[in-house]
Image: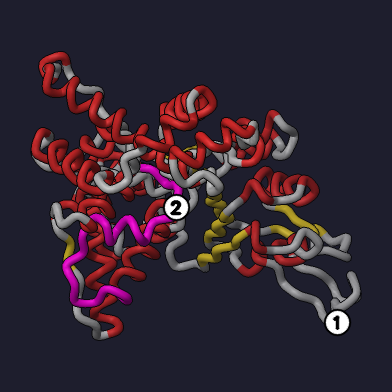
Amino acid sequence: MANESEISPQAVAMKQRLGIVGNASALNNAVERALRVAPIDLSVLVTGESGTGKEFFPQIIHLNSARKHGKYIAVNCGAIPEGTIDSELFGHEKGAFTGAVASRKGYFEEANGGTIFLDEVAELPLTTQARLLRVLESGEFIKVGSSDVQKTNIRIVAATNVDMSRAVAEGKFREDLYYRLSTVQISVPALRDRGNDILLLTRKFAADFAERYRTPQVSFDDDARHALAHYRWPGNVRQLKNVIEQIALFEAGRTISASDIMSYLPEGMNSFVPTVAPSASMHSYEREREMLFNMIFKLQHEIEELRQQVPTVNTSAGMARLSLTGDMPDIAHSAPVTSMVKYGNASDSLFARNADRDARRDVVDVTATAPVTTLEETEKELIRRSLERNQGRRKVVAAELNISERTLYRKIKEYGLE
């Protein structure tokens, strides 16, 4: 397998020609594989998640094949309505259907001697798949509304983000066509598997935007680069470009922090790199004390929320009067105990249940002793200690405090702990 240092000069030149940015081994391997199969007139199936850049590889194959002087036509099979896909691919005769006022050549006729790229090939209807199989096997096709068999000499490169084996098993894609299309397969890696390529692409997209629209260029601090490199990027390169262009527009000329990055990412999306469990060497009584302090702090939040959920009871004396008169409010129905502070952790529901249980057992004590004035200071001190103990590594701090990184970044900024 090729690595960054083993990539051929031909592959380097092709990446520069098409603007392919990245040095990850998996990406270089895919480029080398495309170059290797290009001179051999075989069908190729390019696989990979949406947004990974699969469209570059049919171009590499075409430009390095004997067909490079012929036409190259890219067809998005998912964007053409099922009722017209046959006409688009194979052409039609005049009067073949309503609106067919003249004969029309299809892509297979237009690209004769060249290459056709069928993107999202798994979206083809089964009837069209049968026609495509015939083209692959014999080079023959029939226009819609005609009975004459025509010949074409084309090379097909297909691409999909669908699990083709599953599509075949579910009867959504013909097995024989799958094998004909995938004589050679090229797998394009997801962005999250490309390591430092994320930062290379970030710099490129930011610089390109600033140059194109003549805006001050943004820069990224260490925490921002860390956040970019450790985000999962489910939309891959396409999503990264979208996010960076938004930042370049709205934050022009600024140095971007991690909290800025998080504000441009979709809600609920977590970092890709999993939190590493603390090693045995990190165990200490101080750490246990801090963890206990954290638990108490969160429980205080729950108690305060419980107090706010019982608006009719403002003091312990008032609660006592309610108790003596027999008018104790039904907390389970009139004031449900819920956690208003979300930490994204299953243990939070445990704290909510404990608070609910304690409230039902002794409501007077809860409302009388709930600390209200020191919660912010307690929270600030907890975060400060955790940051010091973990040398400012915010991902570790967020995991230790059982809060999301987005919440941690916001709290650090709010309390001036940057």
Indicate the quadrant containing the C terminus: top left, top right, bottom left or bottom right: bottom left
Q: Amino acid at mark 2?
A: Glu
| Residue sitting at x 86%, y 76% | 94
Q: Is residue 384 visible?
A: yes
Residue occupying image coordinates x 18% and y 61%: 220
Q: Give neighbour class at mark 2: few <14, some 14-19, many 20+ (Cα, 10 Å).
A: few
Question: Considering the image in quadrants, where does the N terminus appear?
Answer: top left
Q: Quadrant of residue 251?
A: bottom left
Residue placed under numbered mark 2 in the picture: 267
Q: Which residue is more in the foreground, 340 or 190?
A: 340
Read off the magenta span: 249-270
In front: 102, or 238?
Answer: 238
Are there few (<14), some (14-19), or many (20+) residues within 10 Å of tag 1? few
- Name above or below for residue 189 compared with residue 155: above
Seen from the viewer's position, the closer of residues 56 and 312 is: 312
Instruction: Indicate the position of residue 308 as horizontal and vertical percent values.
Output: 48, 46
Disc on the earlier residue, 2 or 1: 1
Q: Which residue is mark 1?
A: 101
Q: Is residue 397 left or right of residue 184?
A: left
- Between label 2 and label 1, give the one nearer the viewer: 2
Q: Is residue 237 left or right of residue 251?
A: right
Q: Secondary structure at mark 1?
A: loop
Percent of width and height locating residue 106 = 70, 67
Residue at the image position 70 percent from the left and 58 percent from the top: 151
Query: Could you tell me residue 301's position as x and y percent?
Result: 37, 40
What is the secondary structure assignment of the residue under circle 2? loop
Question: As displayed, is residue 280 above or below residue 194?
Answer: above
